[in-house]
Amino acid sequence: MPEKLIPHHPPEKDQSFYSDLEGRYEIEVNRFVPGYKDKIVPMVTMEVGRKSHKGVVLDIGSGVGNIDEIIIDKFAPKSVDLVEISESMIKESKKRLKDKNCTLRFHKMSAVDFETEPSSYDSVLSNLVIHNLSYDDKVRLINKIYSWLQEDGIFVWADLVRFSDPAVFEKCLEERKKIAISMGATEDFAAENFRKEREEDCMITVEQMAAILKQAGFQNIEIIWTKYNEVIIRATK
C-alpha cells in the first residue's frame, strides 16, 4: 500500500526550511524547479484564471503570493483565500498584495487544518506543496478540496512526483541538481534540498495522484504539463 511506502510526518516539519527562504524564494525555486518561471507559473495561473474571472479562488500553500498576484492582475477574481503555514511567507505575500483590488483572506495554518463551507470556490490551486504531506493527509485534503469546489469548478495541482523506478527518480534529481548549481545555487544548499526530497518529502507517482483525484470524485483528470519529476494536473468537479 502507498501508506507503507510514504513516510508520515506533519507539514510543520518543513516549515523552517521554507521560512528561511522567504526573501529569496522565487530565486531558489527557479533554480531548483526547471520550468518554474516560464512553464509552471504561466500554466497554473492561466488554468485558474480561465475559471475564476470575477470568481473565488483558494490557494493551498500560497507562499510569497507570486502566483496570486498574477491571477489578481490578469483575471480580477472577486476574492482569494491564501492558506500558508509560514508566518514569514504570509508577511511577504501581504506586502506584495497590499494594494490589489481584491478581497484577500490569509489563513496561517497547515493545509490539512484548513476548513471552509462546501461549494465555496470556483477554483483551487496548489503549487509545489502537497508533496510535503503524508499519503493519508493527501487523500483527506483532496477529498476536502472536492467538497469546497462548486460544480464544474477546477483543481490545478502542480507538484513534484516520484517514479516507480528508483533509478529514474534519482536521475531526475541529479539533473535538477546540476541545473540548480549552474544557475548559482550553492553546493551545500543544493545537497540539503535534494537530501530533503529523497529522505523527507512524501512524493507519490502521477498514477497515484490521478487515483486519489478519481476516488474523490473528480472528472476530466488531465496531465497538462510534465518535465523531470514535475507535473501539473487539472481536474474538474
Image (cartoon, rainbow, N blue to C red):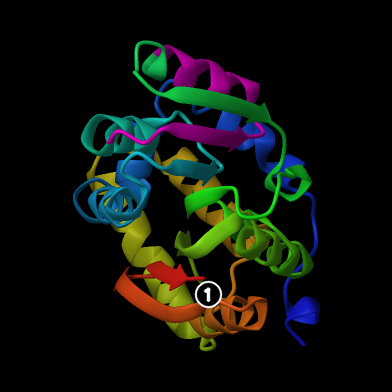
Residue 100: image x %, image y %?
34, 18
**In the visual, does 99 lie left or right of 183?**
right
Q: Residue 27 is drawn in which quadrant?
A: top left
Residue 67: image x %, image y %?
36, 38
The number of callouts visible is 1
Seen from the viewer's position, the closer of residues 163 and 219 is 219
Residue 179: image x %, image y %?
27, 54
Q: Residue 184 is drawn in which quadrant?
A: top left
User: Measured along the vertical axis of the image, is residue 219 above or below residue 36?
Assistant: below
Question: Dot 1: few (<14), some (14–19), or many (≥20) neighbours within 10 Å?
Answer: many
Residue found at x 47% / y 43%: 57
Q: Residue furthest left?
A: 38
**In the visual, does 30 lie left or right of 95?**
left
Residue 180: image x %, image y %?
31, 48
| Residue 225 falls inside the magenta stretch | no
Magenta range? 76-95
User: Measured along the vertical axis of the image, is residue 106 above or below residue 146?
Assistant: above
State whether residue 128 appears in this view: no
Element assignment for label 1: loop
Name the residue that disc number 1 marks.
Answer: 162
Q: Which quadrant is home to the N terminus? A: bottom right
Seen from the viewer's position, the closer of residues 43 and 30 is 43
Question: Label 1 amino acid?
Answer: Arg
Q: Residue 89 is drawn in which quadrant?
A: top right
User: Measured along the vertical axis of the image, is residue 69 above or below residue 211?
Assistant: above
Residue found at x 30% / y 72%: 224
